[in-house]
Image (cartoon, rainbow, N blue to C red):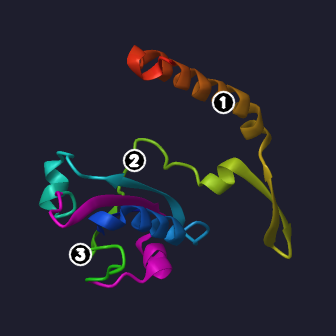
């Protein structure tokens, strides 16, 4: 049964960029059983239920983040990270991580697709992937996505106060 892993992590105030870089390096891409994950800065967020679990409350010593990860099973998560109680990276974090693992009993829809399976096709040799191709559907959607991005940037620039965009 799929699980949601919630991890509260607190970055040292002066080391947030280092924390984010370290987080990016340790992401479980390609680990067996990993589906997807999200990292959210939780400062100023009001979610009482998660606060009661001790996962979502502001930190006076650092900047709090909540990592929400979807795994195919609890065992897959444990095999990938071997999480230890009280563990944290003292170089970038200022308090131990707090974890909760929630088993998904019933879902209204399916979990997000694995990014690698959605975006890429792989040629294999001996059962191992050795070259990846971007799927045709992804390539076909790129011009529309770029158009949306540029359109959004244009709307943003138009909404700026005149004083910010006026050239002398």
Q: Of marks 2 and 3, which one's residue comes earlier in the chain?
A: 3
Q: Earlier in the sequence, mark 1 or mark 3?
A: 3
Q: Where in the figure is residue 63, as x and y percent of width and height?
A: 26, 60
Q: Which residues are magenta?
A: 57-85
Q: Which residue is mark 2?
A: 107
Is 107 placed left or right of 131 in the picture? left
Q: Mark 3: which secondary structure? A: loop
Q: Are marks 2 and 1 in contact (CB under 8 Å)?
A: no
**Eye-nearest disc, 2 or 1:** 1
| Residue 59 shown left or right of residue 122 in the figure | left
Estimate the spatial distance between the alpha carbons at disc 1 and disc 3, rounded to whole Å: 41 Å
Q: Is residue 84 visible?
A: yes
Q: CA distance from mark 2 to mark 3?
A: 33 Å
Q: Quadrant of residue 29?
A: bottom right
Judging depth in this view, the residue of 63 and 119 nearest the camera is: 63
Residue 2 shows up from this direction = no
In the picture, the quarter occupied by the N terminus is bottom left
Q: Nearer the viewer, mark 2 or mark 3?
A: 3
User: Residue at point 50% right, 18% down?
Assistant: 168
Image coordinates of residue 139 in percent, x first then y, are 76, 38
Up the image or down, 34 lies above or below 88; here it is: above
The question of residue 61 being in magenta is answered with yes
Name the residue beneath numbered marker 3: 95
The residue closer to the viewer here, 94 or 134, is: 94
Identify whether 150 is placed above or below 74.
above
Mark 2 in CB contact with mark 3 (< 8 angstroms):
no
Instruction: Check disc 1 and report the residue beneath it.
Output: 146
Name the residue at 19% across, 55% down.
50
């Amino acid at each position: 049964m799929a699980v949601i892993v919630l991890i509260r992590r607190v970055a040292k105030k002066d080391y947030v960029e280092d924390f984010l870089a370290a987080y990016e390096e340790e992401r479980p891409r390609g680990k067996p059983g990993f589906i997807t994950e999200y990292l959210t800065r939780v400062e100023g967020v009001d979610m009482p239920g998660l606060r009661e679990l001790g996962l979502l409350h502001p930190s006076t010593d650092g900047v709090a983040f909540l990592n929400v990860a979807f795994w195919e099973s609890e065992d897959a998560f444990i095999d990938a990270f071997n999480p230890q109680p009280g563990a944290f990276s003292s170089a970038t974090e200022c308090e131990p991580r707090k974890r909760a693992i929630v088993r998904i009993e019933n879902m209204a829809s399916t979990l997000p697709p694995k990014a690698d399976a959605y975006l890429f096709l792989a040629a294999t040799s001996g059962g191992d992937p050795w070259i990846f191709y971007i799927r045709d559907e992804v390539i076909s959607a790129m011009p529309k996505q770029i158009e949306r991005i540029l359109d959004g940037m244009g709307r943003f620039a138009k909404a700026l106060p005149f004083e910010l965009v006026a050239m002398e």
